[in-house]
Image (cartoon, rainbow, N blue to C red):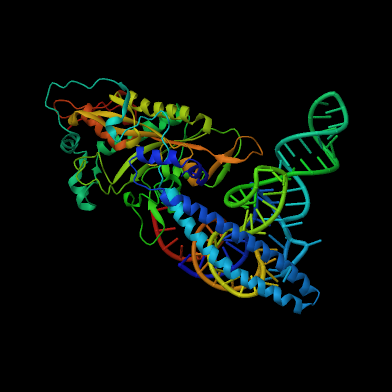
Amino acid sequence: MLSVDFVRNNLETVKESLKSRNSTLSLESFENLDKERRSAITERDNLKAKCNRLSEEIGALMKAKQKEIATPKQQKVATAKIRIKELEQLIEETEAKLSNILLTIPNLPHESVPLGANEHANKEIHSWGNPRQFDFEIKDHIDLGTNLGILDQARAAKITGARFSILRGLGARLERALINFMLDIHTKEHGYQEVLPPFIVNSATLQGTGQLPKFADDLFKLEKSDYWLIPTAEVPLTNIYRDEILEGDIFPINLTAYTPCFRSEAGSYGKDVRGLIRQHQFDKVELVKISHPDKSYEDLETLTKDAEVILQRLELPYRLILLSTGDMGFSASKTYDLEVWLPSQNTYREISSCSNCHDFQARRAQIRFRRSSGGKPEPVHTINGSGLAVGRTWLAILENYQEADGSITIPKALRPYLDGLEKIQL
RNA sequence: GGAAAGGUGGCUGAGUGGUUUAAAGCAACGGUCUUGAAAACCGUCGUAGGUUUACGCCUACCGUGAGUUCGAAUCUCACCCUUUCCGCCA
């Protein structure tokens, strides 16, 4: 969320930003609402001050047993209170409208972000590894997994529905190995604290990270409660410090968590319907940094490298993309995507998205710190990234490491997590 | 799910309708003193909004939301959370 002050004083900048992000939101009403709200507050506060003084006088008169002098003053208060009630209603209405506008304005892009309408304006920063040349007819991960008996989509559709899957035997084991592998590297080598957060959160939490109020359709909500399934561990991790003022020299705070993620994928019908690319439930190891504002763009670089290390250790070819203004998520000021090579699609596909949200989430979630002791609290910066999407890593391994006989070679780095297993085969 | 107790500033903790402008202590910060430090003493010491060129002034906030009253931390109602006990349960 941008601050009211900022929008008021930088209306043109914000309008430009909205345009660059393909937002149709209009700020026409903002100025008037803002003025209306402030004049109503001033009038109300003055009336309240008057009432407070009168009440004090009435109290003194009552004590002195001079009730007859107090009565007209009581009436004055009563009159003022009618107007106060009107004003409060007006304030409530204008504030609701204003906050609705503020909550739906996307974050301002950082100056290093390329301007562009869509993904075609994205910029490749570098690539790593070379896609393997196959001398046989390759299969995609669905055929590979199904044939090996480690992936069962038909039965998952039966027990739940479309976009769910069952991993069995070494398939399930591989998923678990990947989770442990990623968490071990991030905790032991990159200095993140491992966290196991709730997989269900309330709506204040989702508003803090920006999923609500705008993107309720992308989420699963539990009936008869204010509870929602998390779409990513970014949500509980970033909100750990919601409504807190952090003290001391503690930045950056590095957190990592494995969680399942639940997304309704509304509006993506017909996209990636086959396979594990787009599921309603998937596993992810998430990285979050709570950063000092002066260091957050450096921290984004570090976090992105931390995610890249996983792909490098697994020897999966990938490229690093800097997203353009038109392709970035709502809360981000700058985003790198990591895209892994998928032989069956003959292209790179997103496997991690690393964003600096600047003070956007911190302001919504009221996560603050003091630059100096006694100083005024100001918002921290928050950074998050996948390290990595486990399901997509799983399928990338199947496709990149497949052999002519349909077996899968296990990447060397992962073998210690599978009791030294070298191959998944029939 | 049932019963009971509780929720007050960074922390501890007083406060049952009217100088409470939320006491006091701790912690923190500034100063005096000191060669330096500690102690002692003095001062500062919450958040948000509004207003002002500025010093400042005003308003709100004692778990959340409504209500009673001229006036609410204090009284009423609903809800949330914490702790303990009971029930159920992995």
Q: Nearer the viewer, residue A161 or A11?
A: A11
Q: How many marks?
A: 0
Q: Nearer the viewer, residue A187 or A272?
A: A272
Left or right of A372 in this view: A233: left
Report the residue that reaches farthest toward the bottom.
A68
Query: Looking at the image, can residue A258 be seen?
Result: no
The picture places residue A213, in percent across and down from the top left corner, at 40, 52
Q: Nearer the viewer, residue B60 or B53?
A: B53
Q: Nearer the viewer, residue A113 or A250?
A: A113
The picture places residue A286, in percent across and down from the top left corner, at 39, 37
Quarter placement of the C terminus of chain A: top left
Q: Quadrant of residue A222?
A: bottom left
Q: Quadrant of residue A404?
A: top left
- Residue at 48% x, 31% y is A296
- Residue at 30% x, 35% y is A117
Query: Looking at the image, can residue A268 be seen?
Result: yes
- Residue at 46% x, 41% y is A360
